[in-house]
Amino acid sequence: MTWKVAGINFDHSHMGDLLRLCHEHPDVEIVGICHTDRDRMASAIENFAILEEQVFTDFRECLQRTQPDIAILCPSTASHAKWVLNVAPYEVHVLLEKPFAADLDAADRMIAAMSKTQKQFIINWPLRWYPCHVTAKRLLTEGTIGDLVEVHYYDGNRGPLFHVADKEETDEEYRQRKNESWFYQKAQGGGSLLDYLGYGVTLGTWFLDGRAPLEVTTVVDEPPGLEVDEHSITICRYEFGLSKFETRWGTFTDPWTLQPQPKCGFVLKGTDGTISSYDYEESVRVQTHAFPQGYDHPVDKLAPPNQNVIQYFVHCLETGQEPEGPLSPVICRIGQQIVDSAILSAVERRTVPLLA
């Protein structure tokens, strides 16, 4: 069958990336796009030859007239729950772009709303599709470095205003308009912590096979003139030790062009070795007792239906398979527990137990 997709809410520039994946999939058809500001959809209209009758500014009209199978949502973080609850009554499968939610209550409301529809609900974290991290997870599962006991994560980019869809770079004038962007508005769920910590702790929970920390300690910067952070460091204490998750808007370079220092990605320490898995790199570095000097392990070549989230979601829908790993609401909820705990810790300037 052909899966009909509607892209609703273009607040996050990743909508363009997701629609491109739909456009390239032989069994997916974009039947509608919707945003209250038509100008935000201009590049998608041009890039994917979307017809005038498929362009909407009211989500209800879009869903009623196009009757999609899947709704892709890319709203601002603070409005994730609002938009999932908006579309759930239309009984569509939902793909929500990262992060999961503004807080744990919003996450639970989304899970409950989608559970009632018996439609699939998937949360997309683009890092999940990097071959290096997929390879690292496979090596962990195979026991290459024993039991995982430490996750070290550092990730980010030069800042959310340095690029738009397809990583197209913006000009200097655009980059200076921070206070006009929802990314820099506290009420809209802005800040590097909410933008990137979810990546680290959700994939970290995947690497750790669903194990959750006992307590969380977080410190954020306080940039002059901004109401949100651009840098955060979170320490999670588990029964078996400590792990660190660091987010940064303001890396020296963007990792998809040139890896900055520190490098963006993960370093994983096990009882019998280590793995470093850095974003976009073509190998992971492995140390074991047999090879303490370390060696470069080529990344796995991803094949359909596991090359990207659209392939995977269609596969899940066609086979009845439930989304797994960091795409699953179950794993994402643990990640959200950590994020909420981190926010509380940063506000109260103290270590807090993991919020339930």
Image: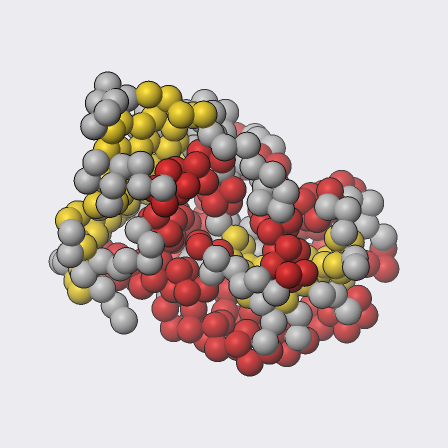
Residue 210 location, x and y as percent?
A: 33, 58
Give the residue displayed 31% in from the left and 28% down from the top.
Answer: 286
Residue toward you, 316 or 351: 316
Residue 338 location, x and y as percent?
A: 29, 59
Give the residue displayed 19% in from the left and 40% down from the top.
Answer: 271
Give the residue displayed 15% in from the left and 56% down from the top.
Answer: 239
Q: Is 133 above or below relative to 335?
A: above
Residue toward you, 170 or 13: 13
Residue 297 seen in the figure: yes
Q: How many numbered discs, if any?
A: 0
Q: Is 227 above or below relative to 156?
A: below
246 left or right of 32 in image: left
87 left or right of 329 in image: right
Residue 340 location, x and y as percent?
A: 30, 62
Quadrant in which residue 345 is drawn:
bottom left
4 left or right of 81 in image: right
Quadrant in which residue 253 is drawn:
top left
Residue 94 location, x and y as percent?
A: 60, 64
Quadrant in which residue 5 is drawn:
bottom right
Residue toward you, 187 or 26: 26
Quarter of the picture holding the C terminus: bottom left
Give the residue displayed 23% in from the left and 33% down from the top.
Answer: 273
What kind of colouring is applied to the model shown? secondary structure
Residue 228 seen in the figure: no
Quarter of the picture holding the N terminus: bottom right
